[in-house]
Image: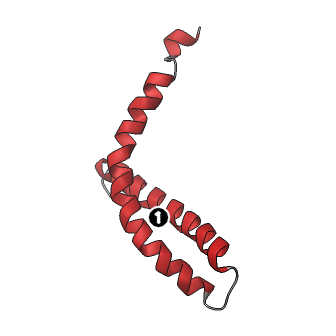
Amino acid sequence: MSPRFAPVLFGFVLSALMSLIVSGIATLRNAGLADGFVTLWLGAWLPSWLVAFPTVLFVAPLARRLVGALVKSPAQVR
């Protein structure tokens, strides 16, 4: 895969993993380890990932700019 797709691939992987973890925690808190937990979890994960992926693509550049404004450049650290 071309390196030019790295930001989109990063967003794809990050949003998939984060939404999987967060939906798993939310499902566990709400349903407990009930029968069919995995089915409930995956049912909660897919729609949340469909929201998370484009959100990450949109928000990542804003987050980078914010971090850049909050962090000193290497020249300012000395």
State left or right for residue 35 relative to residue 52.
Answer: right
Q: What residue is at 36 percent from the left and 54 percent from the top?
A: 55
Pick the front one: 55 or 16: 55
> Outermost residue, bottom direction?
35
Q: Where is residue 37 in the image (x, y as percent from the top left)?
A: 62, 84
Badge 1: residue crowd in 10 Å (few <14, some 14–19, many ≥20): some
Q: Position of residue 66 (x, y in %)?
A: 43, 30
Q: What residue is at 52 percent from the left and 16 percent from the top?
A: 74
* Amino acid type, mark 1: Ala
In which quadrant is the C terminus drawn? Answer: top right
Vertical position of residue 28 compared to residue 10: above or below? below
Vertical position of residue 13 compared to residue 61: above or below? below
> Outermost residue, right direction?
33
> Outermost residue, front direction?
30
In which quadrant is the N terminus drawn? Answer: bottom left
Res. 30 image quadrant? bottom right
Pick the front one: 30 or 73: 30
Q: What residue is at 41 percent from the left and 60 percent from the top?
A: 52
Q: What residue is at 60 percent from the left and 74 percent from the top?
A: 27
State left or right for residue 66 relative to residue 18.
Answer: left
Q: What residue is shown with label 1?
A: 16
State left or right for residue 43 relative to residue 21.
Answer: left
Q: Where is residue 19 in the image (x, y as percent from the top left)?
A: 50, 64
Element class at badge 1: helix
Pick the front one: 14 or 40: 40
State left or right for residue 30 relative to residue 45.
Answer: right
Q: Where is residue 56 in the image (x, y as percent from the top left)?
A: 39, 52
